[in-house]
Amino acid sequence: MNTDGNILTIRGVETYYGKIVALRGVDVDVKKGEIVTLIGANGAGKSTLMMTICGNPRARAGQIVFDGQDITQAPTHEIIRMGVAQSPEGRRIFGRMTVLENLQMGAQLVSDDHFEEDLRRVYELFPRLKERAGQRGGTLSGGEQQMLAIARALMSRPKLLLLDEPSLGLAPLIVKQIFEIIQELNANQGLTVFLVEQNAFHALKLAHRGYVMVNGNITMSGTGAELLKRDEVRAAYLEGGAH
Amino acid sequence: MASTTSQPNIIADSIKDALIAAFLAAVLGFFFFALRTDIGPGGLDLTYRWGLWFTAAAIVFAVRLLLNLFIFKAANPITRGIKLSAPEGVTSVVGRGLGPVLLALAACLPFLLMWLFPNRDRQYIDLAILIMTYVMLGWGLNVVVGLAGLLDLGYVAFYAVGAYSFALLAQHLNIGFWTALPLAGVLAACWGIILGYPVLRLRGDYLAIVTLAFGEIIRVVLLNWYDFTGGPDGISGIPKPSFFGLEFNRSGGFAEFFGIDYDSIHRFVYLYYIIFALALITNFVTLRLRKLPIGRAWEALREDEIACRSLGINTTNTKLTAFSIGAMFAGFAGSFFATRQGFISPESFTFLESAIILAIVVLGGLGSQVGVVIASVVMIGGIEVLRNLNWLKDIFGPDFEPTQYRMLIFGLAMVMIMVWKPRGIISSRNPSAVYKEKKKISSDMVAQGEGH
């Protein structure tokens, strides 16, 4: 695949936890304005790839290029400063801080001038967060916490949004709502999204393109619709799964 | 189960249980109550105190029986209505209104003490200075432990650096208190960075152990570097602070300049106001920083380090700033300590000091400024009050030695506070940013221990 118009190019990335191999030479392309999803079973290495993009842990081999710059060996905070935002696995919101303070943390890196504007924007996307602005993050419901995690990531005006399992532990209705918001962000604001999901059906329906990861290798790739039709994908991730 | 049929069972069970308890008490207490040895001519004299032994067992029996009947085995325990924690409204009102009241009280405390206790004013003002020093240290450590969540068991090291900085600068370069104060703060902050840089990749328990070691290393170096620090002899003759160049002397000083009669109490009052001002600066800076991005980053770091990194925060630098700012305040407090005492030695900077300061922060409620004040008054003032427990002799007889029970009572009080308020005296957190109206967040809403 050619790399024109790529915002993120991952080539031959290998990541280890000590001596254990987690990624065995992964190639992924994310083009500007796309939603790309990565699906796979537990322990396939999806989250590891997400973390490797952010430089924690760093790739031992291969190359990661973001927006024309090699970020393979860059420290995490500098990668984030270049315009990558991450909504990490398990949400990881700041439980003792209020919703507003959580959002302020997300805007830490960008100038204060457009804070109010960005705040209004995320409150429009997630009206629930506006209602709960003064409430402690830890007292929110799971779905609200996920919304907060995404909103917090959006506050830094990212060029690329990394979402790690936003559907984790949420009711189907909330999952649908969150996926709709992701689609809306992509369609209306042109936000590029790289989505890691176990909920393969929803993710592939939403995404322009998808990758399937097994045991630290990318085994299949294609458009979302294509992958949905593939028998291997259906057998492994969809049959009897979440429809 | 119908209560009528179970009633006799309860009584029988209670008596049986109480008998067992009394028997255990009798067995365990046999050598303590029933036998008494005194040093007599030609060896030990053995006396038997069967009455005392029996009384002790009887008390255990009676109390256990009452507890069984009314609380442990009762269908309607009489303690049911009693809640162990104070009602929600009370604490928040106390938390909000207490700050200004305490501030006003602290501002006129020396004059209040001189007026109320004309004979013992010096002693009480000295105690107030001591408490205020710990308030300042508590506030300084609160930045590190309470806000940034870095458990620092070697905080006293920076206190020592501050004290020795001033003492050595005064001794060798003849520098006065007011010049040395900022230098001591800067030096302590530098040490904070030097010590912090290699260890801040560690977290939680591991960080605590390394900081504990650093605290001890500094003390041991001070103890053994005889040529430079004077070793165990310490450094004496540290100059007193002057009031805009005026010394607190019998002639030609502060009193003469203002045309008032010389009184040695002036210096104590002046020292009190110095530490009061230093503590207020600490508090003010901390409260300001909390509202700035760096302060928010500290708090976020305490909550979740990985999330912080994924938001692009340089966690190493954030930790280092917390560490060095905390150290700087300890440096200020240290040089004040040196000038107040006029003499310092490594003995003043043992691990116990670190532990007391940490206890103040934890008892007060991590991150709470007013909590630190209350905890300091309780901890430091409490220890001092317990030194003067002679009135207990009236109750327990002349043989009773109250000072022996000082630490026991003190420990009990600490346990009580932790049972009553497991997250510290003031555990609610004030949001640093407000959208519409301020809302207090009570810790009761969140499970204990979360976010640490």
Image (spheres, coloured by chain):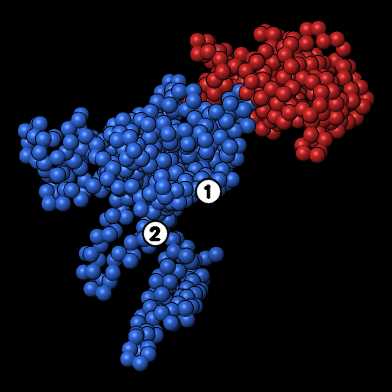
Q: Would you say residue B279 is visible in this rendering?
A: no
Between A168 and B106, the residue placed more toward the observer is B106
Q: Which mark is residue B213?
A: 1
Q: Which mark is residue B412?
A: 2
What letter labels the chain drawn in red? A
- Which residue shows up at 63% across the image and 26% down it? B310
Between A234 and B252, the residue placed more toward the observer is B252
Rendered location of residue B397, percent (x, y): 24, 73
* Residue A110 quadrant: top right
- Which residue shows up at 53% across the image and 13% down it? A111
Between A108 and B341, the residue placed more toward the observer is B341
Q: Would you say residue B271 is visible in this rendering?
A: yes
Q: Amino acid at mark 1?
A: Ala
In this picture, is A71 found above or below B295?
above
Q: Amino acid at mark 2?
A: Leu
What letter labels the chain drawn in blue? B
- Which residue shows up at 51% across the image and 71% down it? B5
In this picture, is A158 found above or below B167?
above
Which part of the image, by quadrant, shows the C terminus of chain B? top right
